[in-house]
Image (cartoon, rainbow, N blue to C red):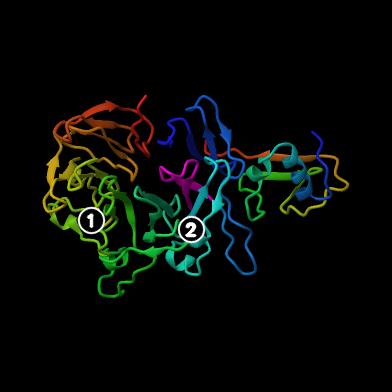
Amino acid sequence: MTANGATVAQALADLNERFPGIRFRMVDEQNRIRRHMTIYVDGERVSSLEAPTAACTELVILQALSGG
Amino acid sequence: MLDPRDQQTLVVASSTGHLGPTIFRSTDAGSTWQEAKQPPAFRPAQGSETPRSVSHTFWLTPGHADELGVWWAGTSPQALWTSTDGGDTWQSVDGFNEHPDYEKRTEDPTAGTPDGPVMHSILIDPRDADHMYLGLSGGGVYESRDHGATWSHLNNGLETTASESRAETIPWEPVGPQHDPHCVQLHPFHPDILYQQNHCGIYRIQRPDDTWERIGRNMPDNVGDIGFVMGLHPEDADTCWVFPMDGSDVWPRTSPGGGPAVYRTRDAGASWERQNNGLPKKGWYTVKRQGMCIAGTDPVSIFFGTTSGELWASRDEGRLWTKIASHLPEIYAVEVAEI
């Protein structure tokens, strides 16, 4: 799906407009990406919500499963 | 948790570990479920503050009978939350969560038990919606008389983990994580009477007294008075049940001597009787703090669930026990619902 924003934070905010609550599943209330979430901008893993996405063509949000 | 006020609303705390903590709710007795629009979440940290992030909601309490739609929740890290819309949106109770002594009163989330320190036993006085109690494990018992705006400790008389392990080297303090109530119960028909099973004994208090009495001193020495559950008789305020566990040197949290038994007092803790008829002669049971439930009257039924997935029942106030389910996953909580 398409999400708009100049940063990861803005893209997640855009997603959250359409899917209320989805951001809190990925990011905690202190703006920390949750432990089992990884975010890639055009194939590069990012650790900050302020990572730029202006030139991004692909934003991948991966949930790592653990526990067997 | 089923709302006793409408017998329709169910509120459930969820934390998958991967997708963060949230609350789900049903308004049709479980046929359909919706996620809360605004689950408990701390405000963003400012300056040098330690950032707080909800790990999980541990406890849910429906509000006073006169306050339809009001709910209370306790989380780890230890914090109190309230909802006025049946659990759809949750607000921080700043009178506790933002108190200047918050860090002194509560347990460091990085230093607690593996599941984190919890807030539990949120109790509402049936005579007065403004009058509340809560338990912090660790942290002690707190009381509010203004609907959560301000809180005072109610820890006088409680022995502590500090005095237990290093007697005479650490002075008793009224506030702090060395206090460790495991389960606090307020008697529904005698709400001036509370009992608690603490990390350091079994206690009773009758308000307006402000000092707990360690009634567990009257338990047999070879059993002790350590455990997690506390079950009250729904009518007789002098009768309650506990499930002792081994609280000796290494705290295995299993039945003392490998002999599982419930103990009952009928005289407010002056004396205790062993109730193990029907239970295994040998067994090393662990029962968690929400693992016992009392239901019905004359005689009352008692249920308890073990971490080994067994559910036991007595229909005659503890005289005879029958295993009614086995091979379940670890049992965290037992509740009775009328269908």
Q: Which amino acid type is shown beneath numbered disc 2?
A: Pro
Q: Is residue A16 above or below residue B101?
A: above
- Could you tell me residue B71's position as x and y percent? 48, 45
User: What is the chain identity of the residue bearing mark 2?
Assistant: B
- Number of other residues with Cα within 10 Å of mark 1, as a class: few under 14, some 14 to 19, many 20 or more: many
Q: Secondary structure at mark 2?
A: loop
Residue sitting at x 50%, y 41%: B69
Q: Nearer the viewer, residue B333 or B249?
A: B333
> For the residue labelled by badge 1, is the local secondary structure a helix, a strand or a loop?
strand
Q: Nearer the viewer, mark 1 or mark 2?
A: 1
Task: State the count of labels.
Answer: 2
Residue visible at 51% across and 51% down? Answer: B81
**Magenta segment boundaries in residue numbering:** B54-77
* Residue B220 part of the magenta segment: no
Residue at 16% of width from left, 52% of height from top?
A: B269
Residue B60: x and y in percent read 44, 44
Near mark 2 (Cα within 10 A), the count class, few <14, some 14-19 or many ≥20, is some
Q: Say above or below: B3 vs B111.
A: above
Q: Which residue is mark 2?
A: B109
- Locate the C terminus of chain B and report the quarter of the image it occupies: top left
Q: Label 1: which residue?
A: B204
| Side of B35 relative to B242 (left or right) | right
**Is residue B177 among the parts visible in the rendering?**
no
